[in-house]
Amino acid sequence: MNHIVLFEPRIHFNTGNIARTCAATNTTLHLIEPFGFEITDKNLKRAGLDYWDKVNIIYHKNLEDFLSHIDGKLYLVSKFADHVYSDIDYTETSEDLYFLFGREDTGLPEAFMRENAEKCIRIPMNDAHVRSLNLSNAACMIIYEALRQQGFAGLELSHTYEKDKLK
């Protein structure tokens, strides 16, 4: 099983977009506190999260709490990594894969990243032009690469709709 993990997310719209991706891909979402927003019905509706109940969400009080509950392979997604995310083999599905993303404003704690440098993966980009990619876009790229390598297991490769525009 694949897992997206958000360390102290600050922007509810990013978290909402990632939750939608998790719902569409049967991916478990882990949220590590504290958050930069309140998870209330009002905020969820404002962010368009009418599918929140369709996402398997696990809440963690802090990074240590999350780390004590994982059972599988952990990847830290960071612009500071040396390994490109698409060069990693995600096909071994006998163990869970956890993709940990940092805060939108400060990323992951530096000491933690230094202790786990071999687990860090990067999305290639032109660093001279931008500081970082949008968190929800980055999470989508990473999870779909893992799913592509896994043959999109559990997902519909095609679907027939009642009012199908191509039929």
Image (cartoon, rainbow, N blue to C red):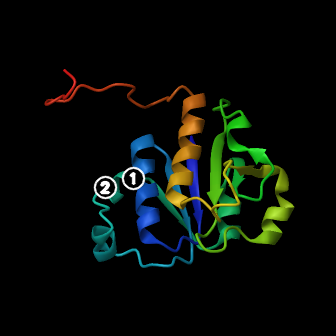
- Mark 1 or mark 2, which is nearer to you? 1
Disc 2 crowd rating (10 Å Cα; few below 14, some 14-19, many 20+) is few
Direction from residue 48 to residue 80 in the image, left or right: right
Q: How many marks can you see? A: 2
Disc 1 crowd rating (10 Å Cα; few below 14, some 14-19, many 20+) is many
Residue visible at 84% across and 50% down in the picture? 118
Please say if the residues under marks 1 and 2 sit with CB atoms less than 8 Å apart.
Answer: yes
View extreme (top): residue? 167
Residue at the disc numbered 2? 51
Please tell me in which quadrant of the rendered image residue 61 appears: bottom right
Residue visible at 65% across and 58% down in the picture? 69
Q: Where in the figure is residue 144, as x and y percent of width and height?
A: 53, 39
Residue at the disc numbered 1? 20
| Secondary element type, mark 1 | helix
| Secondary element type, mark 2 | loop
Direction from residue 154 to residue 81 in the image, left or right: right
Q: In terms of depth relative to the viewer, which is nearer, 111 or 33? A: 111
